[in-house]
Image: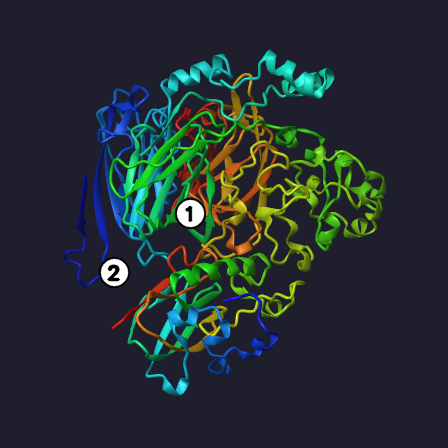
Amino acid sequence: MKLIKPLIAALAMFVSVTALGAGAHGDGHASKSGEAGKPSEASRTITVAMYDNYYEPESIAVKSGETVRFVVENKGNLVHEFNIGTPAMHEGHQKEMVKMVEHGVIQGGKLNRGMMSMDMGDGQSMKHDDPNSILLEPGESKELVWKFSDKADIEFACNVPGHYQSGMYGNVNFN
Amino acid sequence: MKLRFLASAFGLMMPAIVFAGEYNLTVDRIQIDTGDFVKEGIGYNGASPGPVLRFKEGEEVSINVTNNLDEMTSIHWHGLILPFKQDGVPGISFTGIKPGETFTYNFPIIQSGTYWFHSHSGFQEPDGAFGAIVIEPEGREPYRYDRDYVVQLTDKHPHSGDRIMRNLKMMADYYNRQQLTVGDFAEDASEKGFLATLKDRMMWGDMRMMKVDVEDVQGFTGMINGKGPDQNWTGLFEPGERIRLRFINSSAMTYFDVRIPGLEMTVVQADGNNVQPVTVDEFRIGVAETYDVLVRPKTAEAYTIFAESMGRSGFARATLATKEGLEAPVPSLREPPLLTMADMGEMEGMAGMDHGSMAGMDQPDMEGMDHSKMAGMNQSDMEGMDHSKMAGMSQSGMEGMDHSKMAGMKQSGMEGMDHSKMAGMNQSGMEGMDHSKMAGMKQSGMEGMDHSKMAMDDGSVSDPFYAKGSGLLPVAANGGKFLSYADLKAQKPLFEEREATREIELRLTGNMERYIWSINGVKYEDADPIRLQYGERVRFKFVNETMMTHPMHLHGMWSILDVGAGQLNPVKHTVSVQPGTTVYMETEVDAPGQWAFHCHLSYHAATGMFRKIIVEGGPETPAAAVSEQSVKVGGGA
């Protein structure tokens, strides 16, 4: 997760996730948590509901190398994220999410998508378009296809300020 | 002590399983050992604090309280919503519990969270008569943790409550050890000049107050869960665990600034009600408030829970560690704050000024505006006035001003104002203003604005719940985030949002020299009850005209604190009002009967900052059934 993104990525949210792959980050995270998966290779679907501020279920079991299709639904009244990564990745992302709140991109239950692509004056934007993450307003639902790599310390987590800290995360257990 | 059983053992047909719990408390004379001194006090079941009462939402509790004292006693269930006769205030809810008598409280538990209980008789509470209440919710908590500790703070004094009260009445500054001396005067005079210093001192003298009146009862030992700093209460954890700390301030008089060096704290609950989680480095807990925080120590080191009194005259200390006996460094006390002229903001001419409705105003125009010469202005004069002459004017008068009366001011008058010459003026003049009525302001300027952290020109940080320039403005020891009331937003609204049906202004008043505290200038024994109608929504306006912070506690009904978050305003039972500020809260009048409403500083409540509330009408208790007794309640906030 970097704030600096090529503009083109804005349109790439899901459609071109496959094409972009996790390699587009160039930050090495991909090797730890896996990479964007091809929908055709998904072995099964896991539905994850997001409430204020916790997930159901709070842990999932996967196999190394398995591709899973996640259907993520925001059933709460606040904006929530579903992000697959290591605890260190989440911690780094939390700093970026603090900025999104400070700048009004996330306001409680509202996601100001217009502001996300706005140039902040220094060539940076607050686009939230990495393939390992989706950010949803209340009532929204989206899919994320993820190919898990080898066994690693991975959590799915909501990095909206305060949410991870208060326990909005789930464990990914490898069978 | 806890005899819980299934009331519905035979009621398997019932749709819901109802738990009934029976609890026993004895009220006893005990010895309290702070590590600094041993003092006779009052406790429950032989200890102070008493036991942690653990209830479950939906439970019917039955609590037998046996008075082993040779004087009357009572227990008030602080923050619990219950029938008024179970509320435990002698002279308002019931007559009290006689020596040797066992009184049984019966009420349903219809909420969850962290609360506490304490005597409401005399000064038994400062003498040690308090304990914690933890209520488990019916459903799941909206957060996760592996361990759960109550962290109950108090300010144990070597003098009994009765003796402190006598001494304060005899000499209000009896316990004020930080008084400015003749030497301080000489020092100030050499820095500021003799006349300026003399004028400063005379102004303070006029108010019968002193700059150092932050804490009027010093000389205490701060305690956590019954342990003084050297006795070091310790909460155990395994690295990586999330720990819920339930902070309760059971002090008689002391606000604490709480931090755990090395750990961030995520605040998830205030006064028993869940708030949207906010991660902070430090928070200030008012007397009678509770805050629940989650911490996650990742390593096996020890961490100090450090609670410094707001006036820096004492501290409480505890430790989080992987085993007993470990310690982390204990920070030293920071410099005591001095009150400033800002803290007497409401007492100057500004208090009466009226800026009318700011709806439609553009935020950028507001910044840097200096209204300092507008004191006492008449509304009508505002129209078309020219602000261009205001450059260079002093900003001090602005501090602590209250814009709330602005509703109804002619907008057109504002639009015609000439702000053009105001550029470059000092922004800080705006601080301390009340934003609560500014809802209609142009959104573009407001959106995403974080009012809890209004960075000033000089890089300092402000808090809308403190007068600008207030000496009490809290700053995190590590330079990080200090919790503000403005950060508190309800996790889920408890009530439908609606307009208040009326506003009641309560000026918090007092005469420090005579140690009389009052509301609207009238002390409790001379005051008529405040009459509310069942079903109305009342907006209370607190105007603090004193130099002390007052934690105002309404019994029986929630205090919806106006932080400008609309339906997400946090729901509390105790609302702190800082000197020189105006704070609003709204109450859905949904509990028939009569209730206490008072400052929770023990010696302020006892000397008159106290009211009886009578709720007229309602389904269960016709107004006629509410007795008109006016028994003197005494102290025991």
Asked whether B624 or B521 is in front, the reply is B521
Q: Position of residue B474 (x, y in %)?
A: 53, 37
Q: Quadrant of residue B206?
A: top right
A47 relative position to B519: left or right: left
- Residue A160 visible in the shown view: no
Q: CA distance from mark 1 to mark 2?
A: 37 Å
Give me the residue at 58% from left, 14% from top.
B181
Q: Is residue B101 above or below residue B85?
A: above
Q: Amino acid at mark 2?
A: Ala
What colour scheme was applied to this rendering of the protein? rainbow
Asked whether B532 or A137 is in front, the reply is A137
Q: Is residue B272 above or below residue B207?
A: below
Of mark 1 and mark 2, the one earlier in the sequence is: 2
Q: Quadrant of residue B218?
A: top left
Residue B265's label in the rendered image is: 1
B379 relative position to A109: left or right: right
Q: Amino acid at mark 1?
A: Met
Q: Position of residue B115 (x, y in %)?
A: 36, 42
Give me the residue at 82% from left, 39% from top.
B391
The residue where tag 2 is placed is: B16
